[in-house]
Amino acid sequence: MKRVNWRERLWEQNWLLPLLPNYMKPLNEPALMNEHTKEFVYEAEEFISDLAALTELPRLNKTFKRTIQGFSFKIKIKQKKIHAEFLDTNKSSSTIKKRVYITSYRKNVKMENGFGKIIDSTIYYQYNGKTIVRSIRKHPFFQSLFHHIHRLDLSLSGENIKLEEIKNQTNITQEQQLSPATDDKSQIKALISSAEHTFDYYKEINLTTEKALQELLRELRRCGEEYHLLDIEEKHHMKRMIQHDLPNLLKTYDSLNASQKQEKYEETVRTIKQMASYLQRQANDLQSTRMDRMNHLLKLNELRYNSEDQSNS
């Protein structure tokens, strides 16, 4: 039976809510429940997931940061605690700027309901000229963040979490349920499979769109030849494009009526071509890197074996 702590008991007593300090009052702001906040949470999840998949870098007593498209994320990993800070930057298109703080004990230090005990779970946001602070501990929009931090904690301890556990603990989208592949071959295979699925589903929009998608898929396969040479941010950008941006773009376009489609058609195709161009640049850079490595090996072996030939003559 799940143990309910005193904070959770307080949250269940509606008559007590006005008496709670602001940082304990549950978030209940409809203006925040929009696509921008969903994107905010999605990008934060991706950041945490990428950290959990790291195996080659020491992660204790480290601070990791990521800035992307108006968001700034930071995670401090200590021996006893994990501290996360997610915020909208000045470049964010959100009309309500927000800053989220989550701090939890490591599970092996202090545990509650199978998770590391949560110390802080607050959101600060600007609304109607005021700075408001609320708790996101029970808010459905932010629940997945706690589970991703839990996965990071388990990864740091050398443990694994079953995908079924996450599905049972929270309602998250199919896209977010995808278990992150830990090796490069599995990652690129999953990306190509996802791109092929998107292509098959949307290729019949029209011939021009089909050609643009074919080009994107071709460049992605080229990237796959040397995918392991990409750094973590480049892999993240590619993953986000293929599994999130591209299907969302086509799904939204497909939902438009005929006149809306006609209005946004050229812009949509141009965006797909821009994605393909990005992949082409990546593939060309990887090809160049491979040639540089080959030239280095040729020179190295020429020096090594030429010197041996000369010594034997």
Image (spheres, grey):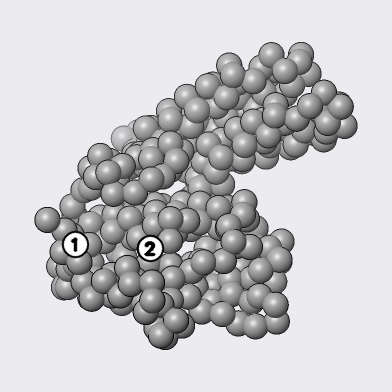
Q: Residues within 10 Å of mark 1 (few under 14, many from 20)?
A: few
**Residue 74 drawn at (x, y percent):** 47, 69
Q: Nearer the viewer, residue 116 or 66?
A: 116
Coordinates of residue 265 in the picture (x, y in percent): 82, 28
Q: Residue at 25% x, 55% y: name it.
A: 155
Residue drawn 62% across the image and 51% down it: 35
| Amino acid identity at mark 1 | Asn
Is residue 128 placed above or below 296 in the rendered structure?
below
Label 2, on which residue?
138
Amino acid tagged 2: Lys
Residue 112 x, y percent position in the rendering: 19, 67
The image quadrant that residue 247 belongs to is: top right
Image quarter where the C terminus lies is top left
Per the rendering, the mark at residue 36 is none
Q: Which residue is mark 1?
A: 113
Query: Residue at image x 68%, y 34%?
Result: 252
